[in-house]
Amino acid sequence: MNHKNHKEEAKKRVKDVRFSVYVVSTSRFRSLQKGEKIEDVSGELATKIIKTAGFTVLTKRIIPDSRRAIIGAIEESIKQKADAVLFIGGTGITWDDATIEALELMLKKKIDGFGELFRYLSYQEIGASAMLSRAIAGLYDDLIVFAVPGSPSAVRLALEKLILPEIRHIVYLAKLELIGK
């Protein structure tokens, strides 16, 4: 089956895509634990964009930027039968950014083009600082995993230009054996 046929088949067979959304921010997580009110602009934006596109958001939570929390989020997403998980934040290069390192240990297959295209499109918007983005995507078994920077503009770009236009096709390919050929 060629690429065009896969996309057509995906439209027929993948009606809904179930997302888990995790905002990775140790400082916001600690503020929540203290009972403080916080703003979650990027998480709320992601949820709105996904739902507006007609897909389901199973969960949206703020988690600390730690390997344990990220692994726990993947496990939770699998238990909830999510098709895709979106991590927002923790993708930078500071000493406490651990999202990418945690995911790279878990991903069975990487979707290298996602990060490449994200940086290319970001470069068009923000210039050379786009090289600092470590946005990645890949598969953990048949769960599709995306990690993007935490800014609202990065979330919008990733969802509207890359993830949502292809998500049915990606789910179809990731679950091909389960859906049946």
Image (cartoon, rainbow, N blue to C red):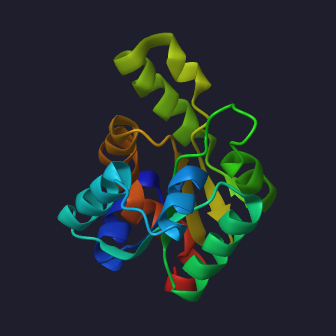
Report the residue at 30% width, 68% height from top: 11
Q: Is residue 32 left or right of residue 178?
A: left
Residue 160 location, x and y as percent?
29, 46
Q: Is residue 90 left or right of residue 160?
A: right
Report the residue at 50% width, 83% height from top: 179
Residue 77 location, x and y as percent?
56, 77
Residue 93 location, x and y as percent?
68, 31
Judge whether 75 appears above or below 47 on screen: below
The quadrant where residue 152 appears: top left
Residue 120 location, x and y as percent?
47, 23
Judge whether 27 appears above or below 37 on screen: above
Q: Is residue 95 left or right of residue 61?
A: right
Judge whether 146 appears above or below 141 on screen: above
Q: Nearer the viewer, residue 111 or 149?
A: 149
The quadrant where residue 176 appears: bottom right
The quadrant where residue 156 appears: top left
Report the residue at 56% width, 51% height from top: 27
